[in-house]
Image (cartoon, helix red, strand yellow):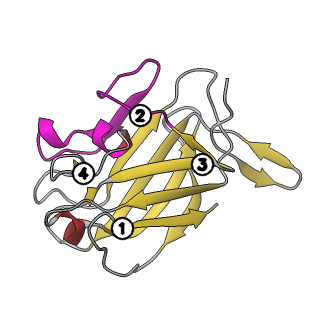
Amino acid sequence: MPVFGTQMFGSSAITYRYWRLSIAVGHNANEVAVGELKIFVDSTQYPTAMTGDSAPSPLVATGSSRDNATRSYWKAFNRDVTSTDSHWASAYQAEFPQYVQVDLGSGNGIAATSYSITAGKDGKETQGPKTFTLQGSNDNSTFSDLNTQTNVASWSAEEERTYTI
């Protein structure tokens, strides 16, 4: 099973089963959108391309809210940013913070070294995250902050930015 997220404390790494992008502020006050969230262990990308909120098994994508069923949680993990609807978007005028997350399944924790966010397109790039934190958890209750970005610049269509953990 892959090791999916790591936080270093001294010389020991912590792996995480749940990976959450928590967005405190978006570039649009009414809605936030993420075209793609990729988590890496060195050069290996996680999760595999999702095809539904709980597919393929054992992956499960969830979040705080969604704009509609077309822009569901799994769209942040489907490895596709080719159309307006190939992204996750929060519910319109939902309060911040908003989040999208993936559960890798029991026994599938990883120790991530970096992550990337790709903006949507066709106007959704203007709704990208502005201040956000990547978090990891093993119980889906207590999350550790692994990397925080504050007041990032506006996004361009399909722009990908990578951050080191």
Name the mark on residue 159. Answer: 1
Name the mark on residue 40. Answer: 3
72 within the magenta span = yes
User: What secondary structure is the magenta-colored segment mainly?
Assistant: loop
Which mark is first along the chain, 1 or 3? Answer: 3
Left or right, residue 52 beside residue 8: left
Magenta range: 47-76
x, y percent for residue 94: 16, 56
Q: Is mark 2 on a helix, strand or loop?
A: loop
**Quadrant that contains the N terminus:** top right
Spatial separation of the CA atoms under disc 2 and disc 4: 14 Å
10 Å crowding of disc 1: few (<14), some (14-19), many (20+): some
- Residue 3, image quadrant: top right
Q: As displayed, is residue 105 above or below residue 103?
A: above
Which mark is first along the chain, 2 or 1? Answer: 2
> Which residue is the site of mark 4?
82
Q: What element carries label 1?
A: loop
Asked whether the beta carbons under mark 2 and mark 4 sit within 8 Å of each other, the answer is no
10 Å crowding of disc 4: few (<14), some (14-19), many (20+): some
Q: Nearer the viewer, mark 4 or mark 3?
A: 4
Which mark is first along the chain, 3 or 2? Answer: 3
> Which residue is the site of mark 2?
49
x, y percent for residue 38: 48, 49
Q: As displayed, is residue 138 above or below residue 89?
A: above
Q: Nearer the viewer, residue 115 or 21?
A: 115
